[in-house]
Image (tube, rainbow, N blue to C red):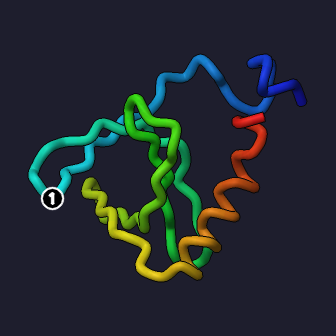
Amino acid sequence: MGNCSQGTCNDHDHKKEKRKIYLTLQDDSKLECDVIDIFEISPQKYIAVLPTNSETALLYRFTENKDEISLSNIESDEEYTMAGDVFLKKNSHNYI
């Protein structure tokens, strides 16, 4: 396995174009985000997104039905901490 910080990983492609998602905010404006990761903590799926021009990732609950996806807020601090910890452990090599 290579060194991710230098872009020499053998297990994934750094040149792969980032997936985009557009969040609709309460005022009906759109927020463009890169999808960082979709991960599962059984049975719930989560998505981590990074808004354009931001250094702070956002975490949401993620559901997928056929061709439609839905995001919802993580309501409890306990669940958010759990999802955040899993996300950081899975993706820590991307931020070193």
Q: Which quadrant is the N terminus positioned in?
A: top right
Q: Nearer the viewer, residue 63 or 59?
A: 59
Q: Is residue 43 above or below residue 1?
A: below
| Mark 1 residue type | Gln
Asked if one can make out residue 27 in the rendered structure from this viewpoint, the answer is: yes
The structure residue drawn at horizontal position 30% and vertical position 36%, both measured from the top left corner, is: 32
Relative to 42, is 75 on the left or the right? left
* 20 versus 70 height, above or below: above
Q: Residues within 10 Å of mark 1 (few under 14, many from 20)?
A: few
* Horizontal relation, residue 66 to residue 77: left or right: left
State the residue in front, 37 or 52: 52
* Location of residue 20 (image quadrant): top left
49 vs 24, left or right, is right
Q: Position of residue 69 (x, y in %)?
A: 30, 58
Q: Position of residue 16 (x, y in %)?
A: 55, 22
Q: Is residue 87 left or right of residue 62?
A: right
Q: Residue at x 33, y 63 (%)?
A: 71
Closer to the camera in the image, 15 or 72: 72
Residue pictured at 77% horizontal, 32% vertical: 11
| Residue named by callout 1 | 26
**Relative depth, front residue between 64 and 14:** 14
Residue 43 visible in the displayed image: no
**Residue 60: horizontal and vertical position, in percent?**
43, 63
In the displayed image of the protein, which residue is found farthest to the left? 28
Q: Residue at x 75, y 55 (%)?
A: 89
